[in-house]
Image: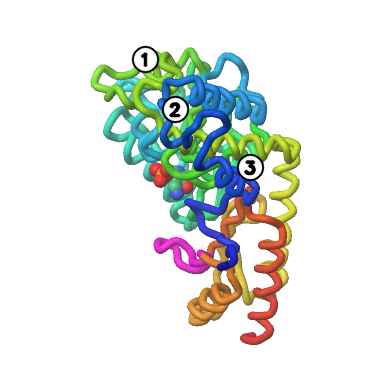
Amino acid sequence: AQERVFNFAAGPATLPETVLLRAQSELYLWRGSGMSVMEMSHRGKDFTSIIEKAESDLRTLLQIPPEYSVLFLQGGATTQFAAVPLNLCAPEEPVDYVVTGSWSDKAFKEAQKYCKPSVIWSGKSEKYTKIPSLQGLEQNPDAKYLHICSNETIHGVEYKDYPTPTNPNGVLVADMSSNFCSKPVDVSKFGVIYAGAQKNVGPSGVTIVIIRNDLIGHAQGLTPVMLDYKIHAENRSLYNTPPCYGIYMCGLVFEDLLEQGGLGEVEKNNVKKAEILYNAIDASNGFYKCPVEKSVRSLMNVPFTLEKSELEGEFIKEAAKENMVQLKGHRSVGGMRASIYNAMPLPGVQKLVAFMKDFQARHA
Ligand code: PMP
């Protein structure tokens, strides 16, 4: 049989082997139900138990306070770029965006259709290698929310601490798609957290929204029913047919993360993996380079370039031969990118680093 590879893709991304095997064993028949999760009524007691367990395990993992709702939605994080302004402000109201990379830039551009967003800081002129200092952020005193992307998947910059909105009635909103559940987070600092599942917690098709309850119920009149948080909160994510199988898979991942000891333990592993990889890059005498400022380097997405850029194709080809795939950087930035989400095992990173050293020795 063909071996599984080490998949360094940015998303959809590698999933824990234990979760895949468990899903395999339950794929044809789920417990005593006589059917697969894919075939179940989303309103039946079996699926109800699945979605309730997924929510309660996620609440345990992130210690989500009771005054927050958890929604399992569709449309990807991209849909939330519109849902956030539609639900949180009126068309003439100001909101603030910090643009640290392509994803926060996309979120800002989408918000322009629904309210009056300002870019209060942009890392574009420095090729998105930085996160602003929290003190230096000049916020609009009336901004209804301050939007950040906690981890820029393409550029590999990650917040290590979070800004506080200066407007006492404003809230912090974060796109956590690519570092969701990779470390503990103080949810109470945020009004809304949203994330596509397909990096750390499951297959694509599920989008998770964590929202403080008082922010629900203020959607603009023209908001499509599928984007209205109130509709989904009132119906416990079952207003229409949800992505049932994806939610089941997320539930298996949450169980697995709890079994690992929770997000504190998960973070320790992620720190260790990232250190090994960044150390290898920094110790290569410039053969490999990571452009990101050291203090904000992502634990999840590690972009790097080769000094001899003409060797990039060869690097990717040889790595693939050794069962390490999807190392090509995003088409907008080039170079390499190793995504090392929760489910990338330590041996995968160790193997990559050993390969990088060997490749350098042969090509320096
Ligand atoms: N935000 C971030 C940080 C992302 O990494 C991505 C996907 N790569 C998106 C948003 C868009 O997510 P989706 O494809 O789920 O719409």
The image position of residue 176, as x and y in percent, is 53, 39
The image position of residue 139, as x and y in percent, is 48, 30
Q: Which residue is mark 2?
A: 140
Q: Residue at x 41, y 22 (%)?
A: 238
Camera-side mark, 3 or 1:
3
Q: Which residue is mark 1?
A: 218
Three-letter code for the amino acid on which mark 1 is drawn: His
The image position of residue 356, as x and y in percent, is 65, 74
Crowdedness of circle 1 by 10 Å Cα count: few (<14), some, many (20+)? Answer: some
Question: Which colour scheme appears in the figure?
Answer: rainbow
Residue 75: say if magenta.
no
Three-letter code for the amino acid on which mark 2 is drawn: Asn
- Helix, strand or loop under label 3: loop
Mark 3–mark 2 distance (CA, rounded to whole Å): 31 Å
- Helix, strand or loop under label 1: loop
Three-letter code for the amino acid on which mark 3 is drawn: Ser
Identify which residue, 325 or 117, lies in the foreground: 325
Q: Which residue is mark 3?
A: 182
Crowdedness of circle 3 by 10 Å Cα count: few (<14), some, many (20+)? Answer: many
Viewer can see residue 138: no
On whether ligand 1 comes within 8 Å of the CB at mark 3, the answer is no
- Helix, strand or loop under label 2: loop
